[in-house]
Amino acid sequence: DAMVIQNPRYQVTQFGKPVTLSCSQTLNHNVMYWYQQKSSQAPKLLFHYYDKDFNNEADTPDNFQSRRPNTSFCFLDIRSPGLGDAAMYLCATSRFKETQYFGPGTRLLVL
Amino acid sequence: AQSVTQLGSHVSVSEGALVLLRCNYSSSVPPYLFWYVQYPNQGLQLLLKYTTGATLVKGINGFEAEFKKSETSFHLTKPSAHMSDAAEYFCAVSEIQGAQKLVFGQGTRLTINP
């Protein structure tokens, strides 16, 4: 089945230690998104890629970066995680102007 | 700027009763509207969407929603609640143009009482 895969499902890191979250898709969608969802809150868009074009949201902290080496994969890098970065991170994909499909998410815990 | 307001952060209904989750939106352009469901520690699953055309939209698991432009609303309903419907529900809006940047409401947690 075509799908959006996120690894790992749970990630524990230490305060200030860089961490990378992974997203892959078999849908061949050209747009990939990263959302942050804190406890009991709505998902908030961090950035998205339209093909290789990176689009950052204005209020996304510089601590958050992303890479998309090819159509199938997209990575979220948190350079120096703080306690406030503990959240569920959701990856989504879509064709341009079409419905977004979400992965299961990675829950990040910062100690 | 677009925004979504979901009335009621918690809704509780009895099994078999009507489910009504309210969503109002604000958009300067004709919107795309969505309802997503999220089960604990899971990603978001699309229930239904409105883009253009028929204003009454049917989705999965017996849910439907009606787009009412005059009321700027997109309420979600299900005639008869099932225990498996217990989850968090998010209403979202996006612009038609460009990559769909979803703006979500705060979510409504639906509890089903036996």
Image: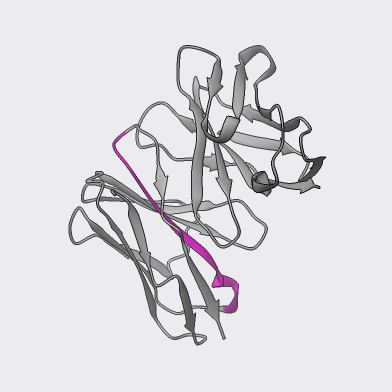
Query: Residue at the location (36% across, 66% down)?
Result: A65
Q: Position of residue B78 (x, y in %)?
A: 67, 29
Location of the N terminus of chain B by quadrant is: top right
Q: Which residues are magenta?
A: A83-96
Asked whether A87 falls inside the magenta stretch, the response is yes
Query: Residue at the location (82% across, 40% down)?
Result: B14
| Labels in figure, total | 0
Query: Residue at the location (69% across, 36% down)?
Result: B5
Camera sees residue A9? yes
- Classify B19 as above or below A104: above
Q: Position of residue B97 (x, y in %)?
A: 37, 27
Q: Position of residue B103 (x, y in %)?
A: 54, 41
- Classify B29 as above or below B10: above
- Is B20 or B85 nearer to us in this picture? B85
- Is A55 or A70 nearer to us in this picture? A70
- Classify A96 as above or below A109: above
Asked whether B71 falls inside the magenta stretch, the response is no
